[in-house]
Image: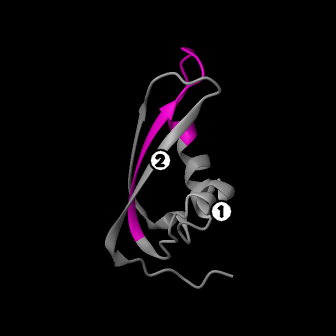
Amino acid sequence: MSSYVIEQNIPKLGRVQVNIDIILRPRSKKLMDIDNCIKPILDAIQDAGVIDDDVQVAKVSIERGLIQKGGGCVVMIVPMSQDVNLAPIS
């Protein structure tokens, strides 16, 4: 995800609260537990530097989308207006 963030020039949001909408694009019709997909996606957003910490996420919406060869997901991040009071990150 880090290379995608750089290539697409996605802004770093810092410590701002965010709402996140996720559309999963499964690789097959096989059913999956969508709740198990949330944490890895939030961790990837944090690791890519888009947000400082996933504690900033105020709301997550997740749904199954259309099947896509190889699978994937669409992630929409909406920044809120207030900063989150976080302890310093080391």
- For image coordinates 48% across by 42% down, the residue present is 74
Residue 15 location (% of width, % of height): 47, 76
Q: How is the image coloured?
A: one colour
Q: Is residue 30 magenta?
A: yes
Residue denoted by label 2: 75
- For image coordinates 55% across by 64% down, the residue present is 9
Residue 1 location (% of width, % of height): 65, 53
- Relative height, residue 6 to residue 88 (above, below): above
Please rate how many residues cluster around mark 1, counting C-alpha atoms within 10 Å: few if below 14, some from 14 to 19, many from 20: some
- For image coordinates 43% across by 28% down, the residue present is 65
Residue 4 location (% of width, % of height): 62, 54
Q: Is residue 33 magenta?
A: yes
- Front in this rendered view, residue 74 or 53: 74
Residue denoted by label 1: 47
Determine whether the residue tagged by mark 1 lies in a helix, strand or loop: helix
- Relative height, residue 12 to residue 68 (above, below): below
Q: Quadrant of the C terminus?
A: bottom right
Determine whether the residue tagged by mark 2 lies in a helix, strand or loop: strand
Residue extending farthest bottom? 88
Amino acid marked by disc 1: Asp
Query: Magenta segment range?
Result: 17-37
Amino acid marked by disc 2: Val
